[in-house]
Amino acid sequence: MTQLAKAKGARVVGTVSTEEKERLARGAGADEVIRYTERDFAAAVDDLTGGEGVPVVYDGVGASTYEASLRSLRPRGMLVLFGASSGPVPPIDPQVLNSGGSLFLTRPTTAHYTATREELEWRTGELFAAVAAGELDVRIGATHPLADARRAHEDLEGRRTTGKVLLIP
């Protein structure tokens, strides 16, 4: 995601939980990296943006980070919750979105963005074209035999993975 955002001219501020993930985020092109396990990243984003906040936050962590993600947004900013590696986000009072500056919240899923065969081919075509052009480096973090699928899922759930995890038949 960092590489695609950078290709569109974005300044990328990443949040990570470990030193290893910080190194990977910087390697992927993040301009700034904040360890949310050590620092209030909403306050850090506030410092980095001169109090303005960011227009969008893509949050794949979930329960541990969503509140700070909301506080990191500028007025009319959007929080895109696309994962829940630390657990699901509890129900959110819509008044929180109002008090944060008329914020937007979405929880996208692939099925809604590939609803037709035409849309699936369009989106995957753009993705594979970016990989082929060298604009997107897909990092394979681990491979497991299909027989070890349980271990792969446990590693994902335990947040012991980085990059893509492949199951090999």
Image: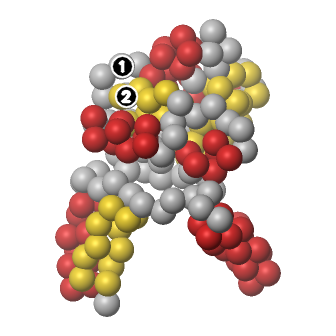
Quick one: which residue is furthest to the bottom in this view? 169
Residue at the (57%, 28%) spot, across then down: 70
Quick one: which residue is furthest to the front in this view? 134
Q: What kind of residue is marked 2?
A: Tyr
Q: What kind of residue is marked 1?
A: Arg
Residue at the (49%, 14%) spot, across then down: 43
Between 81 and 167, the one lying in front of the other is 167
Between 92 and 120, the one lying in front of the other is 120
Query: Where does the image place residue 150, in percent across and percent down from the top left?
Result: 22, 74
Distance Cα–Cα, label 2 vs label 1: 5 Å
In the depicted structure, whether residue 86 falls above or below residue 110: above
Place residue 133 in its image quadrant.
bottom right
Q: Residues within 10 Å of mark 2 (few under 14, many from 20)?
A: some
Disc 2: which residue: 36
Query: Where does the image place residue 25, in percent across and percent down from the top left?
Result: 43, 41
Element at badge 2? Answer: loop
Q: Which mark is residue 39?
A: 1
**Left or right position of 165 against 148:** right
In the depicted structure, whether residue 69 falls above or below residue 131: above
Mark 2–mark 1 CB contact (< 8 Å)? yes
Q: Which mark is residue 141?
A: none
Residue at the (62%, 70%) spot, across then down: 132
Query: Where does the image place residue 126, in percent across and percent down from the top left?
Result: 71, 68
In the depicted structure, whether residue 77 falls above or below residue 109: above
